Amino acid sequence: MAEQTTLPEGVGESADAPHGNATGPGEQPGAAGAEPTGVKPDAAVVRDALGVGIAVGLSGFAFGVTSAGSGLSLLQTCALSLAVFTGASQFALVGALAAGGNPYTAAAGAFFLGVRNSFYGLRLSQLLALPRALRPLAAQWVIDETTAVTLPQPTRRAARIGFAVTGLTLYVLWNLTTLLGALGAEALGDTDTWGLDAASPAVFLALLAPMLKSTTERVTAALAVLLALGLLPVVPAGVPVLLSALAAPVVLFLSGRMKGTGGETATGKKHAEKHTQTSTEEDR
């Protein structure tokens, strides 16, 4: 979930143009009234967005319980969900505070963990092309889940619907369940024994897994998990997730090297075959 990230100015201004002239993701420019490729019914987009929003929004209960169990007050817990609205950073913050960490260090770790949402904002601003007045408000919903729902949509209309429905559903449910979790923390007793802090990451991984279709994507994800788990005991909270992003350039570099080697081998084989053919013709 996301830190507040202001979307770039002046990106995607074409959204203000008449509906028939704007070209969104997956749409082909052409004559007015031309049917865009990859059209997805609005109802299907809403269904998918609600599924993600409800599934992840309910895990706000886990944060409420964990935060209250870490010593934060009801007001502090609810304020984090309302203003920060980034599950990973919120869990990192309360976890560091519960472990006796310095509040400023805990806040810094949570902040750097949420920096990834700035990169989401750069991409989403191009896809959504929202009016300038709406961008600061939409920035609050630039999170992992809205990005995961928005990016695969075939048209700009579908992307906007997916983003709005996911963001609204998740924001309302996350804050409501945070409140319920904080209120019910005393009834649950020792919250550490429940392992509720793992609920939100588990839900997101379950949503992400079906999107890993190629071998490169699966290898990148696996390497990122190994990096995060390996660095977890030796670096401050939040840093392992940031460093796990190094998996992407590493896998892309190795993949490029393998393709380059394969291409050189294929080229050499073709040259050898051509040389053999030429020698045979000369012998004749």
Image (cartoon, helix red, strand yellow):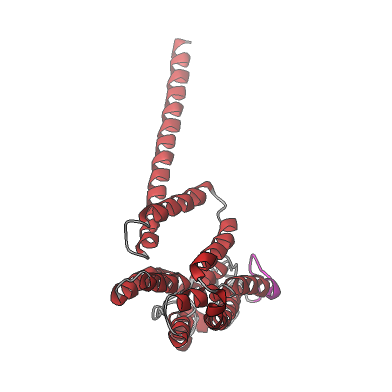
Q: Position of residue 47 (x, y in %)?
A: 68, 72
Q: Is residue 64 left or right of residue 101?
A: right
Q: Which residues are magenta?
A: 33-44
Query: Residue 23: in sight, yes or no?
Result: no
Q: Nearer the viewer, residue 84 or 149?
A: 84
Specify the quadrant of the image occupied by residue 264: top left
Residue displayed at 45% across by 24% down? 274
Q: Nearer the viewer, residue 130 or 272?
A: 130
Q: Position of residue 236 (x, y in %)?
A: 32, 63
Q: Position of residue 81 (x, y in %)?
A: 47, 81
Residue 214's place in the image compared with 113, above or below, is: above
Query: Residue 264: in sight, yes or no?
Result: yes
- Asked whether 140 falls inside the magenta stretch, the response is no
Residue displayed at 67% across by 69% down? 40
Q: Position of residue 28 (x, y in %)?
A: 58, 67
Residue 95's place in the image compared with 9, above or below, is: above
- Asked whether 40 falls inside the magenta stretch, the response is yes
Q: Is residue 5 left or right of residue 189?
A: left
Specify the quadrant of the image occupied by residue 248: bottom left
Q: Nearer the viewer, residue 5 or 100?
A: 100
Q: Is residue 85 left or right of residue 246?
A: right
Residue displayed at 46% across by 89% down? 133
Which is the main secondary structure of the residues drawn in magenta? loop
What is the number of callouts on the image?
Answer: 0
Specify the quadrant of the image occupied by residue 188: bottom right
